[in-house]
Amino acid sequence: MRLAQVLFTQGFGTRRVCAGLIGQGLVSIGGQVADDPDQEVATDGLRFSVQGREWLYQASALVLLHKPAGYECSQKPKHHPSVLMLLPAPLRTRGLQPVGRLDEDTTGLLLLTDDGTLIHKLTSPKHHVPKVYEVTAKHPVDDTQVQRLRDGVVLDDDPQPVRAADCQATGSHTLRLTLTEGKYHQVKRMLAAVGNRCEGLHRSAIGGLKLEGGPERGHWRWVTDEERAALLAPR
């Protein structure tokens, strides 16, 4: 692929802007300035830098963001900044979208991608991708509440009970809740249905992908090919 086209696909601007960046000597490959927009480069494993920023070529981008509180999972936020503002400009330019949503006050693992097919696979209930939440409750958690969450509770907008794929008490006021579907405010409403209240919510894992080990809150990283494959593995 021509170098100017590489920059364009990665979100570094229009084709003219990308050619200009290269022509001005602002793009490097392997530490060497690449100043020819028409230079042919192999994209597999390609690493380059633009104005000193290191970049890894991704045909379709999938990133893991450690979402802090105070951000909305929306391209058109109403009351708080968008989580997209935590990403560098090239990723915003190429149209990354959150895979599902976390409430403004919910923290933790959020995936974003520009691959619509991948979004569908990860959010469709029929694929049963588990999501793990660390829940802080207002009132003490007891065995009865835990069992009811496992057995299923009825929410006010659906006569069919919703069940936790797994639920464990992790402290006097904390739970680890695993869900394989995603209804509006589901964790908070499930806690309310068993007579408790959600005071804090943090997503710690999606599928086999865990937030443990980084990145730090408010930061992001690429999802590796191995991690992507594990997310999509049949269950």
Image: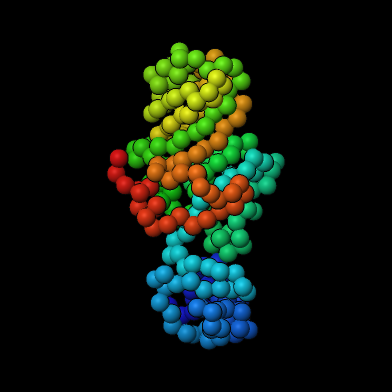
Front position in the image: 43 or 204: 204
Front position in the image: 113 or 219: 219
Front position in the image: 200 or 61: 200
Residue drawn where x is 46% and y is 80% of the image: 2
Report the label total. 0
Query: Which quarter of the image is occupied by the C terminus?
Result: top left
Estimate the x, y position of residue 200 in percent, counting from the top left.
60, 30
Identity of the residue furthest to the left in this view: 234
Front position in the image: 164 or 60: 164
Query: Is residue 190 visible in this depiction of the protein?
Result: yes
Q: Is residue 66 above or below residue 162?
A: below
Estimate the x, y position of residue 85 in percent, counting from the top left.
64, 53
Q: Is residue 104 above or below residue 176?
A: below
Residue drawn where x is 58% and y is 81% of the image: 22
Viewed as shown, does residue 122 lie left or right of 17? left
Estimate the x, y position of residue 1 in percent, counting from the top left.
43, 78
Q: Is residue 98 above or below residue 40?
A: above
| Colour scheme of the picture | rainbow
Viewed as shown, does residue 41 lie left or right of 219? left
Residue drawn where x is 56% and y is 60% of the image: 91
Estimate the x, y position of residue 25 in percent, counting from the top left.
61, 83
Query: Is residue 74 visible in this depiction of the protein?
Result: no
Residue drawn where x is 59% and y is 49% of the image: 216
Q: Is residue 149 above or below residue 125?
A: above
